[in-house]
Image (cartoon, rainbow, N blue to C red):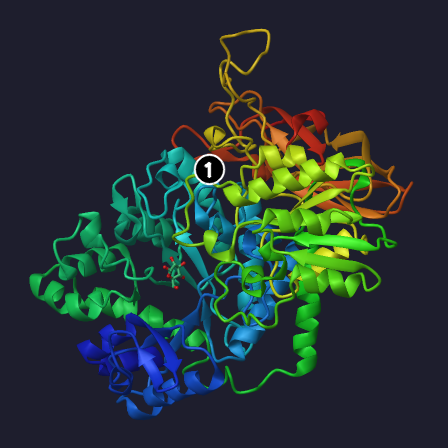
């Protein structure tokens, strides 16, 4: 009999239900705080998992209660939302996606795992892989944007980074892919609102990143708070039990979201906690986070015959198996046993700065407003975000230390020691105008505070706050009126694309600064001063108007595509169909030309790869790194196919005047899609391959191959 089965055979029902319960916790001055409970439950073995307890001391103190005082000595599983770094923060996930670099995505997860494990943690509630095409939704900040293929690449990289090759190593965390599934299309972009999408959208858009995470070996998964066409995900037997566990063979731990089991009552599918607990357990949810539904509801559900002890044992076995895979049963104290060396933390900060630089997206740069000239004497910095440490962290900062964050003011002051930098928070517009009237350049720090995106932060009008727009209007008017107009540069902090058509028109340069983490100010200074060229590309479309939402490059065709010569075609009367900035858009300090696209072989069967080559030349005056995208378009199929499907990307650094041949490779298997019965199909016929700098079709070179059955 295995160690786990031996343990299980000795467990009482309260001890079993304790292993299926995860409770929030913290460590106050007075000692440990266990939400709605006490450390007594840990000591008597009726609470087996915690979230939010951080630090070697506190986590080991809780472990000792479990291991040395409880009857069976089963160690605790302790988790935290390590979403974009732990104490050293990296850019928020939406920003980091803009780097288009799987090695970087994996590296930041690995570094976050090192730091969190050194703090005694064994699990993170990440990666969040929800596909979002609606900037009203605040959790857009936490994911990889609009595209399922990109989301799948990031899901794999994150699972590899957090979990490594040996989950028992003291430097690794169990990852938790979330929120299963289709949380992004909440109705009207409103947080926690109902979701009702087609089976096809589910299979083509929202499931692939979860399938990728499971294929990469993710240890745990978290269902979404939301329902899907009337079935709450926490009770969704067909998708959790039948699809995830049955069809995909996922045998990891499913942990509910925070009180999500209890919320089945408010969803209207459970009459009481016992009902809710039975629904969740029957669907395959193993751990109840913060509803206490399993401990309080399952005994009654058992008595009602709504669940069986065998089902409870199956869930407990999965939790114990996870603790065994994490090495907790062998050594509960291995995480947090060794403090990190200062050199490791310095190296991590250098990585944070590099990732932040690569996440910055230069959306507009007229008249070479950027980079700022090294000889510049007087820079005026406007906006309270310029000096705000907390806001550089972004949402889901968890244990990210505020004091360690570098502001824009600090970064620019360090990068331009010879310049006079005046900073005014911009609340008093007259003072701001006075401050910038003599400046050689004006940098406006605009957009959202960190708490304006993330969970429970949907915005019906994701625009600039009105006060900021008033400041911009006044500053631009004055700057334009000067005898020698000063360039006006806007740094836009946000957890989502903002609807900023007027700002984009008004300023000379516009930078998507997202929330860049610990090294935000230094990374922005590196790009603004030209120390490095910007290279980030937006992983999400920037709409021109909210009325265009949902707006994304992978839309299906219309039978009446927009045609200015024909009134009765797909259009608006008041705005163009095109976005303000398309997916993949991002300028550099170089200027790139694409020539000689070649695609081979001419005939491709399912198991082959399509080899793509294109000449790329940097015609600009500065070295820069270009991101080349490869899309496909299937013009005729049994189901209408998206206008563009992202299939690959490659980054290439080129010196001024340099040309090189960029090569990409597309697996023909990737063009398999769900047929009419939602089963995967590979259909012969023409496949267009399009290559270029973004999803702007006007900038893409195209060629075709023939897909053939072998
Ligand atoms: C939150 C979030 C989830 C997070 C969990 C624990 O409500 O929905 O993403 O992991 O609770 O903090």
Q: Position of residue 74 (x, y in %)?
A: 33, 83
Instruction: Indicate whether 279 appears above or below 303.
Output: above
Q: Position of residue 436 (x, y in %)?
A: 72, 49
Instruction: Identify the element where label 1 is drawn.
Output: helix
> Is the C terminus in the top left, top right, bottom left or bottom right quadrant?
top right
Nearer to the camera, 13 or 162: 162
> At 49% across and 55% down in the image, what residue appears?
213
> At 51% across and 30% down in the image, what residue appears?
545
Q: Position of residue 393 (x, y in %)?
A: 55, 62
In the image, farthest residue toward the right: 657
> At 50% across and 64% down in the image, what residue appears?
397
Nearer to the camera, 390 or 216: 390
Q: Residues within 10 Å of mark 1 (few under 14, many from 20)?
A: some
In the image, farthest residue toward the bottom: 68
> At 46% across and 56% down in the image, what residue appears?
451
Q: Which residue is mark 1?
A: 204
Where residue 498 sits, quadrant-wise, is: top right
Nearer to the camera, 58 or 242: 58
Task: Tell me if 224 is positioned left or right of 518 in this view.
Answer: left
Nearer to the camera, 413 or 564: 413
Q: Quadrant of ligand 1?
A: bottom left
Task: Tell me if 428 is positioned left or right of 416 in this view.
Answer: left
Q: Cβ(mark 1) to ligand 1 < 8 Å?
A: no
Instruction: Indicate whether 589 appears above or below 321.
Output: above
> Is the N terminus in the top left, top right, bottom left or bottom right quadrant?
bottom left
| Number of disc labels | 1
> Taking the image as drawn, is residue 1 in sight?
no
Instruction: Indicate whether 467 appears above or below 112.
Output: above
């Amino acid at each position: 009999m295995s160690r786990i089965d031996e343990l299980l055979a000795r467990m009482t029902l309260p001890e079993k239900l304790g292993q299926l319960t995860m409770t929030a916790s913290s460590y106050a001055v007075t000692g440990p705080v266990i939400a709605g409970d006490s450390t007594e439950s840990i000591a008597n073995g009726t609470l087996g998992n915690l979230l939010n307890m951080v630090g070697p001391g506190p986590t080991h103190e809780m472990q000792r209660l479990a291991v040395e005082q409880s009857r069976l000595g089963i160690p605790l599983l302790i988790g935290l939302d390590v979403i974009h770094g732990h104490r050293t923060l990296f850019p928020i996930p939406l920003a980091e996606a803009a780097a288009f670099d799987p090695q970087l995505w994996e590296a930041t997860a690995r570094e976050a795992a090192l730091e969190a494990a050194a703090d005694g943690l064994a699990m993170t509630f990440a990666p969040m892989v929800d596909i979002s095409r609606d900037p009203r939704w605040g959790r857009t900040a936490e994911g990889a944007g609009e595209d399922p293929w990109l989301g799948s690449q990031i899901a794999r990289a994150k699972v590899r980074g957090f979990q490594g090759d040996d989950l028992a190593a003291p430097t690794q965390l169990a990852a938790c892919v979330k929120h299963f599934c289709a949380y992004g299309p909440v109705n009207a972009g409103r947080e926690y609102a109902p979701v009702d999408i087609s089976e096809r959208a589910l299979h083509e858009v929202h499931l692939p990143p979860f399938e990728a995470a499971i294929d990469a070996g993710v240890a745990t998964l978290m269902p979404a708070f939301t329902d899907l066409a009337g079935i709450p995900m926490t009770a969704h037997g067909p998708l959790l039990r039948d699809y995830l566990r049955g069809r995909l063979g996922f045998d990891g731990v499913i942990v509910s979201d925070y009180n999500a089991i209890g919320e089945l009552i408010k969803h209207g599918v459970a009459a009481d906690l016992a009902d809710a607990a039975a629904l969740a357990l029957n669907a395959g949810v193993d751990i109840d986070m913060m509803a206490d539904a399993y401990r309080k509801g399952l005994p009654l559900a058992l008595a009602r015959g709504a669940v069986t002890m065998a089902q409870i044992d199956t869930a407990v076995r999965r939790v114990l198996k996870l603790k065994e895979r994490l090495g907790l049963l062998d050594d509960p104290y291995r995480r947090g046993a060794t403090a990190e060396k200062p050199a490791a933390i310095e190296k991590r900060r250098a990585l944070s700065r590099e990732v932040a630089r690569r996440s910055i997206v230069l959306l507009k740069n007229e008249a070479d407003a950027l980079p700022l000239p090294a000889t510049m004497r007087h820079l005026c910095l406007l906006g309270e975000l310029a000096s705000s440490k907390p806001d550089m962290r972004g949402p889901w900062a968890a244990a990210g230390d505020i004091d360690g964050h570098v502001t824009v003011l600090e970064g620019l002051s360090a990068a331009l020691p010879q310049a006079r930098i005046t900073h005014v928070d911009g609340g008093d517009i007259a003072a701001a105008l006075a401050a910038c009237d003599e400046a050689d350049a004006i940098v406006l720090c605009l957009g959202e505070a960190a708490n304006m995106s993330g969970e429970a932060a949907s915005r019906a009008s994701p625009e600039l706050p009105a006060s900021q727009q008033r400041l911009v209007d006044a500053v631009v008017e004055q700057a334009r009126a000067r005898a020698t107009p000063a360039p006006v540069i806007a740094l836009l902090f946000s957890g989502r694309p903002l609807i900023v058509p007027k700002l984009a028109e008004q300023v000379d340069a516009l930078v998507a600064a997202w929330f860049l983490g610990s090294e935000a100010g230094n990374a922005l200074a590196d790009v603004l001063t030209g120390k490095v060229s910007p290279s980030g590309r937006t992983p999400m479309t920037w709409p021109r108007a909210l009325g265009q939402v949902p707006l994304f490059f992978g839309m299906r065709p219309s039978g009446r595509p927009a045609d200015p010569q024909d009134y009765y075609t797909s259009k608006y009367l008041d705005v163009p169909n095109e976005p303000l900035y398309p997916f993949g858009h991002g300028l550099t300090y170089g200027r790139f030309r694409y020539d000689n696209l070649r695609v081979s072989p001419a005939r491709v069967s399912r198991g082959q790869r399509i080899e793509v080559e294109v000449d790329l030349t940097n015609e600009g005056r500065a070295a820069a790194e270009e991101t080349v995208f490869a899309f496909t378009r299937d013009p005729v199929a049994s189901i209408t196919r998206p206008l563009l499907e992202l299939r690959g990307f490659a980054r290439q650094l080129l010196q001024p005047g340099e040309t090189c041949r960029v090569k990409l490779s597309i697996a023909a298997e990737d063009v398999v899609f769900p047929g009419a019965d939602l089963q995967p199909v590979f259909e012969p016929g023409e496949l267009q391959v399009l290559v270029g700098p973004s999803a702007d079709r006007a900038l893409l070179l195209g060629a075709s191959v023939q897909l053939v059955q072998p």
